[in-house]
Image (spheres, rainbow, N blue to C red):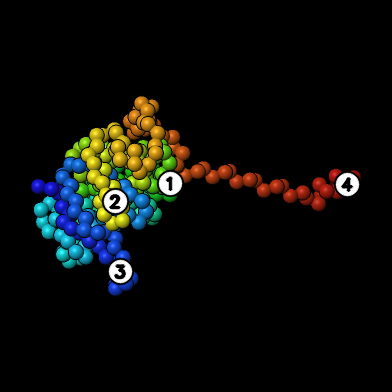
Amino acid sequence: MSLIELKDVSKLYGFGDATSVALDEVSLSIEKGECVAVMGPSGSGKSTLMNMIGLLDHPTHGDYLLAGKRVSRLSANRRARIRRDKIGFIFQSFNLLGRLTALENVALPLLYKGLPTSKRNSAARAMLERVGMHDRCYYYPRQLSGGQTQSVAIARALVNDPELIIADEPTGNLDTESSRLVMELLSEIHKAGNTVIFVTHNPELTRYATRVVYMQDGAVKYDEQTKLGEVGSYARNAMYKIPETTEEDDLAGVSVLMKVRPSETESPKKAPAKKPAKRTTRKKKRKAAA
């Protein structure tokens, strides 16, 4: 049985002549344990598809089955409960709360489930250790690098042990090294048995997926199975022109998880305050004048 099954799902916005079609009769089936990359130009319907799968929106037409249960017409409260218990979200802009520490941010979803503080913190610590951020538990988001911040966001998405991880452009705001760190973490999560769906504009990142879905004009234009470590052939030959992956790229992706990062993101030390200049007394001025 498929974990996700969309049947002729459409999403329309507006009325009459002003109607726009965000999704156009999309049928898509995703098995448990797959890692699916969703690609396509801006406005192709990628984000709308993710919102639909993540129960942040509901279809205008068609059916959506999640783990065999029809969820396309559930109430807002029922959708919220399923999101809380079964789906983990990773956003491009991280969406961490600036006034909470990394530990508190990761523990937050467990608060909504009513777990006591000790259990929340224990689970959050374990998840931060899993993503290599155990030594940043009490850091605030402003004290972390982009890659570290996204790692905390990944830990938060995993803390509820969801069946499905949805990542919308998880590396969109990151540099190359931080992007590798995040994608290697997602790859480890997938290899542990989780179902992962991520949106990307970067064809190079399809090497972390087992399947690539290409969207255009609100519809699935192409759907191909891929091997881990290889870029999708459609992305390489038809949609984009990208360089061949070298062995150095592979080694860089693996080693970035083991690299000891310098504590460059710690709060900068304040410069020592300058001592006030000594005042010259009138007596000293007279001596100097003499």
Q: Is residue 12 above or below residue 189?
A: below
Circle 2: element type: strand
Lower position in the chain sequence, tag 2 or tag 4: 2
Task: Determine which of the numbered discs, if any, sits on residue 143 in the image.
Answer: 1
In this rendered view, identify the residue nearer to me: 239 or 58.
239
Lower position in the chain sequence, tag 4 or tag 1: 1
What residue is shown with label 2?
215
Proximity of marks 4 and 1: CB atoms separated by less than 8 Å: no
Looking at the picture, which amino acid does disc 1 mark? Gln
Picture residue at 15% right of the left edge, 44% below the top? 32
- Image quadrant in which you'd find residue 260: top left
Percent x, y of residue 69: 11, 56
Proximity of marks 3 and 1: CB atoms separated by less than 8 Å: no
Circle 3: element type: loop
Looking at the picture, which amino acid does disc 3 mark? Thr
Decide if residue 60 is on the left or right side of residue 20. left
Visible residue check, residue 215:
yes
What residue is shown with label 3?
19
Proximity of marks 2 and 3: CB atoms separated by less than 8 Å: no
- Could you give the CA–CA distance between mark 1 and mark 2, rounded to whole angstroms? 37 Å
In this rendered view, identify the residue nearer to me: 240 or 63.
240
- Could you give the CA–CA distance between mark 3 and mark 4, rounded to whole angstroms? 89 Å
Lower position in the chain sequence, tag 2 or tag 3: 3
Lower position in the chain sequence, tag 3 or tag 4: 3
Circle 4: element type: helix
Task: From the image, state whether disc 3 or disc 1 is nearer to you.
Answer: 3
